[in-house]
Image: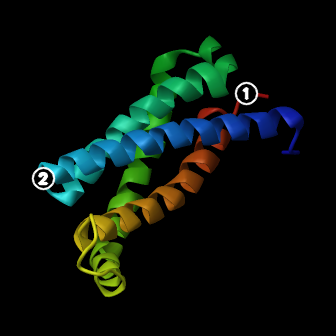
Amino acid sequence: MPITKLERERFIKFAFVGISGTIIDFGIFNILLYMQLSSIFASTISFIAAVINNFYWNRNWTYPESKINPIAPQLIKFSSVSLAGLLIRTVLYKLIEQPSIDFAEGMLSENILFSAQVIGNNISLAFVIIIVLFWNYLVNRFWTYKNIS
């Protein structure tokens, strides 16, 4: 597929939608961590909230032409991609969580606003969000929104 001006605009919109989803993701994640809930639980709930946000905005703003298609099959595809992304995210997060916390402990002084655990959790979340962003964009563009010219 050639990269047209329209495709570049869609990518930029997709990125803005992703930024809004990331803000929601980090916000809910940190609120749930503050409530002393499990980081895996917090990561899952924040991810689901971000997916709902992203589906709405991608369907209505990034790919408004897709609204001619029935919402249910599109939502199923988008959700399937997102669930696979959640699996990728959860496995990667669990693998890098403790090393990220250890890294933060080694880099921080004790007189800092946030604990090494909170910073390590956020480093882990940022890393997995970037990985899953590429997964979501590519698979959604070529599967969920493949019939959009």
Q: Secondary structure at mark 1?
A: loop
Residue at the farthest bottom position: 106
Question: What x and y, as percent, mark residue 15?
Answer: 62, 42
State whether residue 92 appears in this view.
yes
Question: What x and y, as percent, mark residue 70?
Answer: 54, 15
Q: Which residue is mark 2?
A: 37
Quadrant, the C terminus: top right
Q: Residue at x 61, y 46 (%)?
A: 137
Residue at the farthest left position: 36
Q: Left or right: where does residue 124 sit relative to residue 19?
A: left
Front-most of residues 105 and 58: 105
Q: Residue at x 28, y 49 (%)?
A: 29
How many C-alpha atoms fall within 10 Å of the one at disc 2: few (<14), some, or many (≥20)? Answer: some
Identify residue type, mark 1: Ile
Q: Which residue is mark 1?
A: 148
Contact between labelled residues 2 and 1, with CB atoms less than 8 Å apart: no
Q: Left or right: where does residue 39 sit relative to residue 48?
A: left
Front-most of residues 118 and 58: 118
Identify residue type, mark 2: Leu
